Image (cartoon, grey):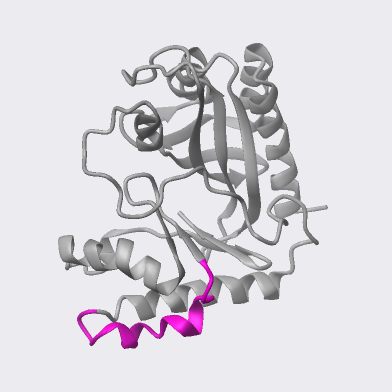
């Protein structure tokens, strides 16, 4: 192994510790793999936390208290470097457990609950220096009947992993293949930003990039759409109606794209 494979292997211990979820063991693994001043960035209400202990006590332990038998279930792990040579490992999956106590004031259900996560770990010299992550908290609110907004237009459900089944185990990363996957996604996004300012839906050339039977897995509150029409009807058209200036503030955003064989990610 070496490079990205090593980073991915280093994260295996942290992932396993969140499956077994032994508190002392989890804290020890997190401390061992992270730089002391690593920044862990989660969306509201958690925000940014500095140091592995702060991340554990203010986020992971909060989830554990609400779901005492919580475990982590990854369905994809990938690694690569962005255009600036920064090394990343990305993960996607669900936390699952019995919802017995309030979580962020969301009332418990007494039933199995699931919360999707997407996590991106920045590695420097073999240690985590930053995590950028989203926990799909609205997904939990919906399961608890505590969603205060209108229903999703798309289908809400516990989404599966990649259809190919190789999200966790696949051949060694090939740099050229990985770069091609990354560029394909960037080209797709650039084409999508052409609409509506440069013309109708045809300027996006979506059939060039999207499989006719693809699933677009939006976050809770948006939901899943099937195929190009499903994506357009249940997400893109209403999204653009609400935010017509989409794509106009790219200069204010820092993107980190990276590829791993047939997969690409951005944080």
Q: Position of residue 52 (x, y in %)?
A: 53, 25
Image check: 112 left or right of 250? right
Q: State the residue at coordinates (59%, 60%).
A: 81
Q: Position of residue 165 (x, y in %)?
A: 71, 56
| Residue 46: in magenta span | no
Q: Quadrant of residue 264?
A: bottom right
- Name above or below for residue 158 compared with residue 198: above
Q: Quadrant of residue 203?
A: bottom left
Quarter of the image containing the C terminus?
bottom left
- Name above or below for residue 155 compared with residue 58: below
- Name above or below for residue 62 compared with residue 91: above
Image check: 145 left or right of 58? left
The boundaries of the magenta stretch are 196-214
The image shows a total of numbered marks equal to 0
Q: State the residue at coordinates (49%, 26%).
A: 51
Q: Nearer the viewer, residue 260 or 236?
A: 236
| Residue 205: in magenta span | yes
Q: Nearer the viewer, residue 155 or 59?
A: 155
Q: Position of residue 12 (x, y in %)?
A: 72, 37
Image check: 8 left or right of 82? right
Q: State the residue at coordinates (75%, 52%).
A: 5
Q: Nearer the viewer, residue 145 or 62?
A: 145
Q: State the residue at coordinates (30%, 54%).
A: 153
Q: Position of residue 36 (x, y in %)?
A: 54, 27
- Name above or below for residue 6 compared with residue 111: below
């Amino acid at each position: 192994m070496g490079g990205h494979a090593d980073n991915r292997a280093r994260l295996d211990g942290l992932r396993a510790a969140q499956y077994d979820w032994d508190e002392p063991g989890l804290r020890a693994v997190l401390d061992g793999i992270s730089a002391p001043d690593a920044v862990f960035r989660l969306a509201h209400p958690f925000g940014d936390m500095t140091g592995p202990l702060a991340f554990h006590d203010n986020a992971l332990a909060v989830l554990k208290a609400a779901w005492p038998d919580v475990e982590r279930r990854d369905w994809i792990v990938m690694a690569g470097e962005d255009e600036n040579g920064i090394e990343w490992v990305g993960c996607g999956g669900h936390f699952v457990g019995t919802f017995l106590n309030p979580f962020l004031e969301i009332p418990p259900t007494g039933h199995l609950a699931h919360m999707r996560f997407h996590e991106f770990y920045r590695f420097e010299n073999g240690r985590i220096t930053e995590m950028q992550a989203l926990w799909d908290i609205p997904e939990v609110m919906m399961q608890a009947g505590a969603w205060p907004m209108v229903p999703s237009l798309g289908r809400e459900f516990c989404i599966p992993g990649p259809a190919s089944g190789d999200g966790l185990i696949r051949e060694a990363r090939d740099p050229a293949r990985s770069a091609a996957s990354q560029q394909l996604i960037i080209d797709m996004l650039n084409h999508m930003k052409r609409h509506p300012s440069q013309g109708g839906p045809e300027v996006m050339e979506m059939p060039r990039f999207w499989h006719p039977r693809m699933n677009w897995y939006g976050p809770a509150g948006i939901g899943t759409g099937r195929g190009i029409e499903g994506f357009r009807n249940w997400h893109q058209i209403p999204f653009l109606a609400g935010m017509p200036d989409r794509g106009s503030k790219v200069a204010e955003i820092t993107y980190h794209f990276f590829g791993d064989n047939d997969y690409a990610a951005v944080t």
